[in-house]
Image (cartoon, rainbow, N blue to C red):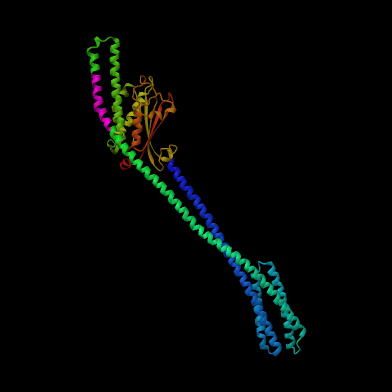
Amino acid sequence: MLIRKSLLGIFSAMAISLITLICFSWLAFERNYEAKTRNKAVDNTFLVQLKNKELLRVMLDIETGQRGYLISRNAAFLKPYNDGRRELSNVVKSLKKLVSDNASQVSRLDTLNQLIYLKIALMKSNIVRVRQGQSIDVSELTKGKNTMNELRAVSKRFEQLEQELQVERNALQKVADESVNLYLLLLPSTALLFLLLFFRLLYLELYRRLRFQVMLEEKLRELERTNAELEQFAYVASHDLQEPLRKIRTFGERLLRKHADRFDDDGQMNLHKINESAARMQQLINDLLAFSRTTNSLEQNFEMVDLNQILESVKEELSVAISAKSAQLNIEPLPTLTATAHQMKQLFANLISNALKYSHLDIPPVVSIVYALINADEVKHLAEARPETTYHHFSVRDNGIGFESQYTEKIFLIFQRLHNRNEYEGTGIGLAICRRIVNNHRGFIKAESEVGKGAVFHVYLPITTAEDLKN
């Protein structure tokens, strides 16, 4: 849970930083785009002023050419007039395109056009008169002069408005440039801030994990010490405890056999209880030894094991109980897999003896073992199943007394019994040993049952190598 919270915190910080950086990047892009637009607007205003000056220059060239021709009556002087008229058309088109987004300037440009056409018409009239050998019309010259003065006034006003617009646009461009600089500064600063934040988070996570690793190593050392103590306990149980028990049983049986006539019924009953308790104590010790051996790594010699041979050995070992209860065993062909042979024998011996033990008194037990090879997808409803793993699936089914479904986990706990030992013998360790063996092989075991309808134990063992199981 702590690791999940840490990862959630890191991922949340990453998401927030990513969103923030995207927002700042987008704002910086917008401000940069705005700055380019403002800069383009300033350039456009500057170009309008240049074209406006060029318009006046061209008009002066046209007027100069007309004046030279009228004075000299030499057609060579008309060249500036003709060239200017051709150039004038292009200048007016360019100027109209530049001010197309400004309605007031478009209106003034239309006024300029009208004055230009009027000026040129007046100049053309006197040129025609001179070509025809007539005298110059002074009134038209006067009108032309007045028109040119009006044209200069409109052009000057046109220029003034563009200059005012340029001042305004320069101010906006300055603001846009400052905004771009601000966001360009904020972007790496924010990235650096989040980088430092991530470094801090990763440092804290690494520090926490190192502390956890140190604690884990300490726990492992404690576990090793505990295992050593358990091994010592197993040694004591197998030697020092069993010897007094054997003597208790031996002398108790000798008392019953040789001196039974010296005890009344109550004394004989007490001797029987002593012997039974000693026998039960010895069975508990043997089962505890078996359980402790399943945790001992020295006992886990992984090799290729033929389960068919294992089951034959189990049937032979349980032959007396099978015959006594007229039990029927139906076993499908089983695979050869990587396992510890004696633990596989314990596993199936405990499951089968469990089925024989908890059978109906008046119905012969029937035990069936079914095998199948399945993928993890087929058991994905089980939390223990690892993805992309293939499992050996063994189903051990019986027709015994069964148990209530609420006890499907309790039965695998050590010393847990669902029945009084006077009804059914046993120490309550067998299924705990089964779970420990399955865990040693990286698998898991589940139980299903209904009262009076038998039980089925599902064993799932992954396909692995000996190296995988040892790691």
Q: Quadrant of the C terminus?
A: top left
Q: Is residue 14 visible?
A: yes
Magenta highlight range = 231-250
Residue 235 is inside the magenta segment: yes
Judge by depth and name the residue closer to the eye, 57 or 340: 57
- In which quarter of the view is residue 242 placed? top left
Judge by depth and name the residue closer to the eye, 64 or 153: 153
In the picture shown, does residue 382 fall above or below 319? below
In the picture shown, does residue 420 fall above or below 333? above
Q: Position of residue 100 (x, y in %)?
A: 66, 68
Left or right of residue 248, residue 331 in this image: right
Left or right of residue 62, residue 401 in this image: left
Q: Position of residue 14 (x, y in %)?
A: 48, 50
Left or right of residue 195, residue 76 in this image: right
Judge by depth and name the residue closer to the eye, 309 or 436: 436
Q: Position of residue 62 (x, y in %)?
A: 67, 82
Residue 167 is inside the magenta segment: no
